[in-house]
Amino acid sequence: MPLVPEVLSLLQSSVARDTIVTLTMPARTTAFDVASGVLQITVLVVGLLALIALTATALALRKSVQALQATAERLAADAKPLLYQATRTSEDARDVVKTVRREVDRLAEATGEISERLREVTDAAGERVDQANALLEVLQEEVENTALSAAAAARGLRVGAVALGAALVGRTARGAASAESEDDADDELDEADDDLE
């Protein structure tokens, strides 16, 4: 077998050392290979369709966002005067509420003062009425006492005058005249008592 190395060296001398010769062998195509290729193409087509749909959706969304921004800007421009007016109105309402609150407080304070003064006046009037009633009672008692005293004095004067008249006229003529004068004196006394009642 010493020949083998020589043959090998001859074969190697005719071919350049850096060149490699390869031969391709056609592979056999199976059903799995065909199905795999079809699936790859299908996935590629579905991916492209999804990319196109996603791009269309993104463009539509962009247009919607731009339209929404334009509407928001328009509304913001329209809303600025409304917001300004609403702010002014709320400030005015706040001022009105403060003013009303101040006036209500002042009114409540004035009402309290008036109520207190009315109580004082009512109490003072009640005391004065009580004092006037007491004075009237005292005056009534004094007038009654004075009237009774005057009536008693008048009766005493009449009785004394009748008695004095009878004593001066004499005892003899006393018979008929004295009976009449006593009746007249009794009638006058009864009238005086009636006047007092």
Image: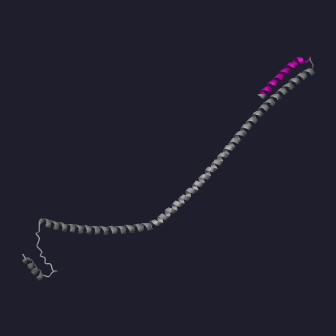
Q: Residue at x 57, y 56 (%)?
A: 98
Extent of the magenta region: 172-194
Measured as percent of width and height from the top left, residue 84 is found at 49, 65
Q: Residue at x 47, y 64 (%)?
A: 83
Which secondary structure class fits the magenta region best?
helix
Q: What colour scheme was applied to this rendering of the protein?
A: one colour
* Number of marks: 0
Residue 113 or residue 136, whichever sits in front: 113
Examine the rendered structure and indicate whether residue 112 appears above or below residue 177.
below
Q: Residue at x 8, y 77 (%)?
A: 4
Residue 21 or residue 116, whichever sits in front: 21
Q: Residue at x 51, y 60 (%)?
A: 90
127 left or right, relative to 168: left
Give yes or no for residue 19 being in the magenta stretch.
Answer: no
Which image quarter is the N terminus in? bottom left
Which image quarter is the C terminus in? top right
Choose top left, top right, bottom left or bottom right for residue 95.
Answer: bottom right
User: Which residue is the extreme one toward the front?
Assistant: 2
Residue 84 or residue 194, whichever sits in front: 84
149 left or right, relative to 14: right
Give yes or no for residue 187 being in the magenta stretch.
Answer: yes
66 left or right, relative to 133: left
Choose top left, top right, bottom left or bottom right for residue 170.
Answer: top right
Residue 29 or residue 125, whichever sits in front: 29
Measured as percent of width and height from the top left, residue 96 is found at 56, 58
146 left or right, relative to 128: right
Measured as percent of width and height from the top left, residue 80 is found at 46, 66
Choose top left, top right, bottom left or bottom right for residue 160.
Answer: top right
